Amino acid sequence: MVEILGHLWDGIILSVQPLNLFLIFIGVVLGLFIGAMPGLGSVNGVAILLPATFLVPPASAMIFLAAIYYGAMYGGAISSITLGIPGASTAVATVFDGRPLALKGRADLALVTAALASFTGGTIANVLFTAFAPPLAHVALSFGSPEIFALMVLAFATFIGLGGDDIPKTVFSICIGLVLAAVGYDEISGAPRLVFFDITGFMHGINFLVLAIGIYGIGEMLWTIDSTRGKMTMTEARLTVDGIISSTKEAVRRGWKGSMIGSFLGFFVGILPAAGATPGSLMAYGVAKMVSKNPKEFGQGHPGGVAAPESANNAASTGAMLPMLTLGIPGSPTTAILLGGMVIWGLVPGPRLFTDQTEFVWGLIGSFYVSNIIALVINIGFIPLFVWMLRMPFTILAPTIFVLSVIGGYAATQDMHDIWLMLIFGVSAYFLRKLDYPVAPAVLAIVLGPIAEPTLRQSLLMSSGDPMIFFNRPIAGPIMVIAIILLLLPAFKLIYDKMRGKKPATAE
Amino acid sequence: MRRAEIVTAGILAVISIYLMWKSTELDIGYIRGDGPGGGAWPFWLGAVMLISTGFIAFNWVRRTSPPSHSSAPFLDDYGKKMLLLVGGGVAGFIALIHVIGVYGAMLVFLVYYVRFLGRHGWTATIAIAVLGPVTTFFFFDVLMRIVLPKGYLEPLFIPLYHIFL
C-alpha cells in the first residue's frame, strides 16, 4: 500500500509539471466543448487530436488525451441540461432529470449537481483504480456474454418495473428502440437486415444519435412550444453567490446517494469489456431510481437523477482505462483509440506495463486526479455562462436548438438520409408523447441494443439454444432473477391493490 | 384524444406486423452451430410490440389510460399551426441543405425563425443569422475537420479552405 501511495505521489508530481498541467488545462476545456456539442463525443475529440500529440512525450500525450476524455464526460451534461439534447451517448440519462430541472428554472442546481457528481464519480473511481487495478481486471474478464446480457435485461427491467408509465406503452417503446438498433447488417451472418423499402441509407444502420436528437431536439421542442402555447420562458435561474451556495447544498443533500450508486456501478460497468460509460450511466439512473424513497420524482426533475448518470459516466471513463492498461482490452471506443495511440508510441499495454513503464502508468493515474480537480473548477466557472445562454428569449433558443440538432445529427453520421430520419422520429415522438408513450426507454434501447443482441445470440450459441444459461451461472443467475422480479413488480402491485379492494393502479 | 389513441395503436400494430414480416427475410429460427438466425431478434421484438398494442387497445376499451377517456382534441388549431410553421420550417431547413448547403440553409432558417416567428428586430436577426454559421464553420470545418455539405455554394468556400484548412 505504501508503495502504491509512493508511486501515486510521483505520478501527481509528474502531472503537475508545467507542460503537463498546461496540457491538462487545454484538454479539459476542449473536452468540455466537444462533449457539450451534440453529435460529438470524447471519441471524436480523442481521435481528431491524437495526431497533434506526437509533438510531446508519450506520457504528456496520454495525459492530454485523458484530459479530453475527462472534460467530455463533464461536458456531455451541459447540453443535456441546458438544451435538452444529449451531448453524447454517455449523457442520455442526464436528460431525463436534467431537462425537467432546467425547465423549472433550476438549471443552476442541475449543473452544479452534474459537476459535483462527476467529480465524486471521478474521484471514487480513481481511488478504486489506484488500489485494485490488477485484481479487478481479472474479475471483469469473468463476465461473459450471458452476464452482460443479464445486465442489459436488468437495465430494461428497471424501466418497466419502476417507470411508473403505462406498461404496454413502455414495453412498446423499448422494443421499437431495440428493433431500430437492429437495422443495418446482421453482425453474425453479414446479411443486410431491415433495410426498409430498400433505401440504401438504412444499410449503415441507425445511429443512436439520430433517434436521441430527433426525440430530444426536435420532438421535445415541438412538445414544449405546443404545451406552453409558445409563451415559453426557459428559466429564471437567479445567479447570485448565495443562490449557487444553496444550490450546492441542495445538490449534495439530494444527490449524494445517486452519486455513490453511480460511482461504484459506473466504475464496475466501465471495466467490463464492451460495456463502458453509456450502459453504466443508464444503469446507474435505473438503480438510483429503484432505491430512491420517491421514485416518482425521477423524471420530473430530481437532482439524484442527474447525479447518478453523471457520476457513473465519469467513473466508467476511469474504469474503462483499467482493462486497457492492465490487459490491453479497451472497454469503450475512446479507450480503443487511446490504445492505438499507446501502440504508436511503442508502449505495450498489458500486465507488464505496470512494471516496465512505471513512470508512464503512474503519471497517467496521477493526471486523473489532477484533471478531475481542474475539470470541476473549470466546469463550475462556466456555469454562469451556460445559465446566461438559457436566458435568451425562447424564440432565439428554439431555432438554435433546431440548428444544433440538424448539424449534430449530420456530424454523427455525415449522411443526409439520417437528418430526414431524425425529423421523422422527432415528429413521431411528439405525437406519441401526446398520447403518454414514454420516449426515454426507446433511446435507452437503441443505445443498449447493439450490446444486448450479440450477447444474447452468443449466449444461446454457447448453450445450444438453452435459455437456462442465464440462470445457472453464478453471476448471470442472480442478476437475471432480480430483473425478472422487477419485471413482475407491476403485476404484483396490481394483485396487491386488488386484494385490498382498490382500483387497479393503471386506472388513474 | 380518444380516437387518436386507438388510431395510433392501430398504426403501431401495422408497423409491428411489417417489422415481423421484414425480419423473416433472414432466418428467424435457431440454426444448429450458428445460434439464433439474424431475423430472430427483430422478429420476436416485433411480436412483443404487437402484443403491447393489443394491451393498449384493451386498455382503450376499458378506458383506463388517460388519453382513452380524454375528450381534448389531439391537435387543436394552435397545435396544427405550430406544427406547420415550426415543423415545416425545420423540414424546409433540411430540404434547403440539399440545395445551398448547411451554412446557407442555416442563415435562411435563422432569419425565418428569429424574424418572422420570433418577431425580433432586424439587428438581432442579422447578428444571430450571421454569427451562427460563422461559429459553426470554425468549430466543425476548421477545428474538428468535419466538412459539412455546402450544396451549390461550394465555390464560395474555396478561398476559406485555402486560408484555414
Image (spheres, rainbow, N blue to C red):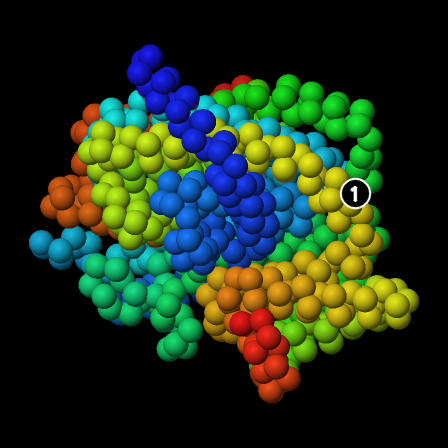
Circle 1 sits in a helix, a strand or a loop, which is it? loop
Q: Is residue A96 above or below residue A304?
A: below
Residue A128: x %, y % from top left: 38, 23
Q: Is residue B53 above or below residue A199?
A: above
Residue A243: x %, y % from top left: 79, 28
The residue wearing badge 1 is A235
Q: Name the side, left or right, on which A389 lies relative to B59.
A: right
Residue B67 visible here? no
| Amino acid bearing label 1 | Thr
Q: Residue at x 48, y 69 (%)?
A: A414
Q: Label 1 is found on which chain of the structure?
A: A
Within 10 Å of disc 1 (Cα), the crowding (few <14, some 14-19, many 20+) is many
Pick the quarter of the image with the C terminus of chain A.
top right
Image quarter of residue B43: bottom left
Q: Residue at x 9, y 55 (%)?
A: B32
Residue A66: x %, y % from top left: 44, 42
Q: Residue furthest top?
A: A2
Q: Residue at x 20, y 47 (%)?
A: A458
Q: Name the side, left or right, on which A91 lies relative to B126.
A: left
